[in-house]
Image: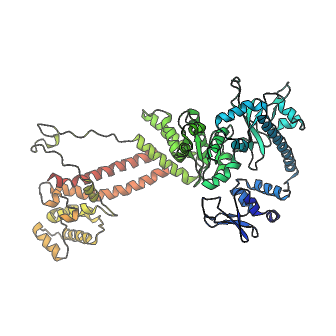
Amino acid sequence: MDELRTRISLSGVIGRSIRVTKAGREFKACCPFHNEKTPSFTINDEKGFYHCFGCGAHGDVIRWMTDHQGLPFMEAVKELALQAGMDVPAPDPRAAKVAEQQKSLHDVMAAAQDFFVRSLADERGEQARRYLASRGFPPGVVREFGFGFAPDSRTALKEALSAFPDAMLIEAGLRIVVEGKEPYDRFRGRLMLPILDPRGRVIAFGGRILSAEKTDAPKYLNSPDTPLFDKGRTVYNLHRAAPASRANGRVVVVEGYMDVVALAAAGIGEAVAPLGTALTEHQIERLWRLVETPTLCFDGDAAGQRAAMRAITRALPMLRPGHSLRIATLPKGMDPDDVLKRDGPPAMEALLNEARSLVDVLWQVERDALPLATPEDKAGLKARLLAHCETIQHPDIKSLYRRELTERFGELAFARKERAPFQPRTGGQSRGNQGKGPWKPAPPPLGADDKARMLKVGNGPSTILLSAVLAGLVRHPGQISRHVESLARLQPEDSRTAALLDALLAMADDAQTLESASLEPILIERGLRPPSAQDYAGMRFGFSAGESGQASDELAEAVSLLVELPAVEEALAAATQAHETAFSDDSFAEQQRLLQRRLALLARLGQMGRARAAL
């Protein structure tokens, strides 16, 4: 490898892909790894590395071939060795034999490609040329992608490649053997498209049928798996898409190679496609070498949705930090070419930019898969979501997916129904006020600003409610002894409030019996100022305003709220953490119980502040 680096001109290799200019002893260019207008990408042949001062891209000639050209490491070494006139040592005789066999098959595939291209250009390819014109593919795109034509003959390819034995044509997937019959050409009467490896060599073909009369033949036909071609590992157009994806940070995966060509003709050069199969784990890994989040673009029909779901289920076990998929869904019944012809490239770009995250699509597909009319239906949805989460191998991502999907499920399954607004009775008394005087309307709801002040809490209890309670105890000192234990558990954040509370508790411990009129001067003498209405945001509480009828009960409820609310908050946090770990029905039920209790306490806390409006 050291010899390889010394024989290869780094600037020469990079100059085949981007425009470089001489700058002293170095070369400069606009960085191919990020968009820029002023060149910050330098190439130093003497030191054998490139470096971008804009994005930090750095490496040698092998790194260039892997990062920019998208080649696997060994493929990059082999490609550079070929350019340098060097032989890569074969690891063992069997591997050397396979390499020699593949070299011969590459010659066969190159000859077949030449034959298909010539056939497209002569009179036999007239129908195929008309089809290409109907698709709107410009001549440059037709040449770049290597379109050809396979004549409608069982022996045309064999005759054209007579220099190669029939066994090699069969091994390359160009001829078919049927027991008891003569072998015949696999591709007949089809528009041909070569499938290339990352080094740009033909390894297989795809053919589209042109005759509408052959209804029993498949519309698209690909080469079978051969020593050169593995459908599950090959990504169509990867060698062309890699440079474009490095420049804009995006890879678009469509369903077929004709979609790739249509997008390329529209200026979207980073499109690739699987080959007759759903996206495989190997193909996803190849795509992740280019970008961390490839965009999958599927047709809007049922088949497209099934393809999206198959890709999701394949990707879930492989997810790792920063690596995922995005899903773009086309309008129903349309493929990329339809969108481009009807609405133009900007519309296609808009659809790609609106691609949704993997978790969003997973949630929507499973949510809409079956009716959710009964509890059993909803339980089935939960089971399906959890089954998907269990396939994720990375522990952090698994936990986050479970949390995200269960939160969405909870919002769906336990959604609160809006109740009709309360309508007071007319001409009579409300049920709660029977025997207690004429009916009065309920006080108006607490305003948003008032409620925010009312519920303002820190690490301790509500400062507003605590101030009101202390004011109430100063006015009704006989109630202090009833709540000594509860009051002693409070830990006010404000030092003056804490000192006042300690003084009141000390008076209760001394068994001092004080009148409200004498208590306030004593506190003032000690430098303790009893709370006023301004300390609790101008709210009016019955026990703090001096009303004696219900002061005892209201003070007891207020003190209870001061103690219980922080305890419920703490228990809810612990239950939420336990649910994320155990994720059982019991843990979920406990979390919901505490949540409902918290909401009830906050609602009662807010109702206490309505006294001002009622008065």
Decide if residue 594 is on the left or right side of residue 405: left
- Please tell me in which quadrant of the rendered image residue 561 appears: bottom left
Residue 220 visible at all: no
Decide if residue 33 is on the left or right side of residue 506: right
Residue 19 percent coordinates (x, y) = 69, 59
Towards the viewer: 192 or 522: 192
Image mark count: 0
Screen quadrant of the N terminus? bottom right
Towards the viewer: 527 or 568: 527
Residue 545 percent coordinates (x, y) = 14, 60
Q: Residue at x 39, y 41 (%)?
A: 414
In the picture shown, does residue 396 fall above or below 8? above
Residue 398 visible at all: yes
Residue 162 percent coordinates (x, y) = 89, 35
- Please tell me in which quadrant of the rendered image residue 321 appears: bottom right
Residue 538 percent coordinates (x, y) = 19, 61
Q: Residue at x 86, y 38 (%)?
A: 168
Colour pattern:
rainbow
Decide if residue 574 is on the left or right side of residue 454: right
- Please tell me in which quadrant of the rendered image residue 5 appears: bottom right
Towards the viewer: 504 or 132: 132
Decide if residue 399 is on the left or right side of residue 281: left
Towards the viewer: 84 or 39: 39
